[in-house]
């Protein structure tokens, strides 16, 4: 009996406090109207597709860098540096560029091979996971498997050829470097 009495008293207190809280707080609509009435500072510039500048850049970080007209510290040395054309790359620099491009090509081919092997493994897992598919599509699977294996072998050959080209480029660069350096 006491439990029922305590439970009723507790629930009455919870209901009374909830009613008091709702009576004191304003509604969500009133709060939204009050927030809308408050003035916010307008945005400095809002860019849309219609007013987006095409000839200049937009900096969201800060002020644009000073040009030579605005920067009095820029002296005649800066103007000479701008007027002088940049020298052509030396043969050594060109060789290094070709070597780095070849390394990038090898990395791309290896990435493609890795993806191809992963895809093949997923197809194998899917095929062998379902016995019904194994019974129905044996011919289709054998064709797909042969294609995957041929593609993997072709990609591996491309990688081997690219690596051979890289070694040849590196050897040529070494020989050119040895010929250009004076013998001591």
Image (cartoon, rainbow, N blue to C red):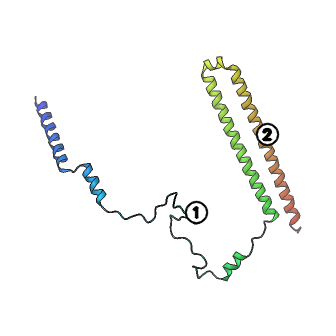
- The spot of residue 139 in percent (x, y) is 71, 20
Q: How many marks?
A: 2
In this view, the residue in front, 37 or 146, is 37
SS class, disc 1: loop
Of tags 2 and 1, which is closer to the observer? 1
In the visual, does 67 lie left or right of 29? right
**Residue occupying the point 70% across, 27% down:** 144
- The spot of residue 102 in percent (x, y) is 76, 51
Task: Quickly name the residue at label 2.
Answer: 157
- The spot of residue 4 in percent (x, y) is 13, 30
Residues marked 2 and 1 touching at CB (< 8 Å): no
- The spot of residue 64 in percent (x, y) is 54, 70
**Residue occupying the point 13% across, 38% down:** 12
In the visual, does 146 lie left or right of 18? right
Task: Quickly name the residue at label 1.
Answer: 54
Disc number for residue 82: none
The C terminus sits in image quarter: bottom right
The N terminus sits in image quarter: top left
Mark 1 surroundings: few (<14), some (14-19) or many (≥20) residues within 10 A: few
C-alpha separation, residue under disc 2 versus residue under disc 1: 47 Å
Vertical comparison of 157 with 81: above or below? above
Decide which of tag 2 and tag 1 comes sooner along the chain.
1
Mark 2 surroundings: few (<14), some (14-19) or many (≥20) residues within 10 A: few
The answer to which quarter of the image holds residue 128 is: top right
**Residue occupying the point 71% across, 39% down:** 113
Vertical comparison of 180 with 17: above or below? below
SS class, disc 2: helix
The answer to which quarter of the image holds residue 43 is: bottom left
């Amino acid at each position: 009996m006491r439990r029922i009495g305590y439970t009723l008293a507790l629930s009455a207190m919870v209901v009374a406090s909830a009613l008091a809280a709702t009576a004191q707080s304003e509604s969500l609509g009133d709060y939204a109207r009050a927030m809308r009435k408050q003035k916010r500072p307008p945005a400095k510039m809002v860019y849309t597709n219609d007013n987006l500048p095409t000839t200049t850049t937009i900096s969201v970080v800060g002020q644009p860098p000073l040009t030579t007209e605005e920067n009095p510290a820029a002296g005649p040395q800066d103007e000479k540096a701008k007027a002088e054309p940049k020298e052509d790359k030396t043969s050594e620099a060109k060789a290094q560029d070709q070597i780095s491009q070849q390394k990038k090509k090898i990395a791309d081919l290896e990435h493609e091979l890795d993806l191809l092997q992963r895809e093949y493994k997923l197809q194998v897992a899917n095929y062998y996971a379902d016995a019904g598919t194994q019974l129905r599509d044996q011919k289709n699977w054998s064709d797909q498997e042969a294609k995957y294996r041929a593609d993997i072998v072709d990609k591996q050959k491309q990688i081997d050829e690219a690596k051979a080209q890289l070694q040849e480029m590196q050897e040529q660069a070494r020989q050119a470097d040895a010929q250009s350096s004076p013998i001591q």
